[in-house]
Amino acid sequence: MTKDKLPSEQVKVDYEYDTLTNDRLLKDHEYDGIRELDNAPPSWFNMLFIGTIVFAVLYLYILWMFQPAGLVQAKEYQNELAKAKTTASAEPGTRAIRMVLLNDEESMQNGQKVFNSVCAVCHLADGGGLVGPNLTDKYWVHGNSVKDLFTVITEGVIEKGMIPYRDQLSHQQRLEVSGYILNNLVGSEPANPKEPEGELIE
């Protein structure tokens, strides 16, 4: 009978060693005559690897449990949208202006200047429409009240290529250009009017 081998003697691996560094070589790991050393990863690498796992766990926990606006785009969008609506209704540092249809001569002159410098590039100077819709007919995409026009000018229509003008035009200027459109362009006869868009509003 043969004696049972001790656990340390049951598996015996014959390692080879590099003749230059005397470090152990990986067994059966050779390519084109090149052998790889059987070295353990350095401790700094192991710590870095563990650190990335810890960071990922903490990041996901903070992201889904607290949902900070800076990390969750949907929440950031909602915050910006709420901020825009607040700014449109009452801008900080300015007196509240009622949504009334201005029609005095000074307001119409100021509104025309703003329209020609800002709006005419997309709607044409006569309001007939180019990239933007025709502003002279009775068809409106976003409504034709003073508040409707003021809101569109303030917040823009990004999906149609119109940027918001809350930072470029003051509260008063947006009200004046809205009044100019409703008083002077609606019902006029432009040279080459664009086809109607939106709903008919009498």
Image: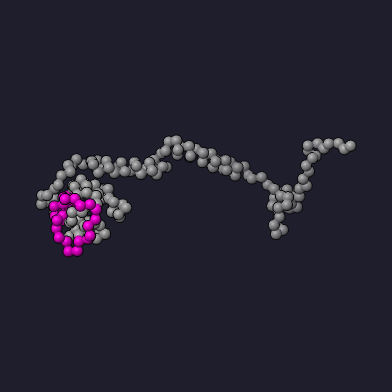
Q: Which residue is the extreme one toward the right? A: 1
- Choose between 143 and 102: the one closer to the eye: 143
Most extreme residue toward the bottom, as rendered? 191
Query: Which quadrant of the structure image shows residue 186?
Result: bottom left
Query: Magenta stretch?
Result: 176-202
Q: Is residue 153 above or below residue 122?
A: above
Q: Is residue 3 left or right of residue 83?
A: right
- Find residue 59 and report its horizontal and vertical position in percent: 48, 40
Foreground pick, 39 / 78: 78
Look at the image and tell me whether residue 116 can be seen. Answer: no
- x%, y% of residue 178? 18, 50
Please say which color scheme the image uses. one colour
User: Measuring 16% from the left and 50% from the top, which residue is drawn there?
Assistant: 202
Query: Can residue 47 be spotted in the picture?
Result: yes
Q: How many marks?
A: 0
Q: Residue at image x 43%, y 36%?
A: 66
Q: Is residue 194 above or below residue 77?
A: below
Q: Is residue 180 magenta?
A: yes
Q: Residue 51 lies in magenta, yes or no?
A: no
Q: Residue at x 78, y 37 (%)?
A: 7
Specify whether 77 is left or right of 89.
right
| Residue 10 position within the rendered picture, expressed as x and y whole percent measured from the top left | 79, 40
Residue 70: image quadrant is top left
Question: Which of 147/173 is in front?
Answer: 147
Give the quarter of the figure containing the N terminus. Answer: top right
What x and y, as percent, mark residue 125? 19, 60
* Residue shown at the point (24%, 55%) measured from the top left: 197
Q: Nearer the viewer, residue 140 or 162?
A: 140
Compared across the picture, whether 180 is left or right of 8 comes to left
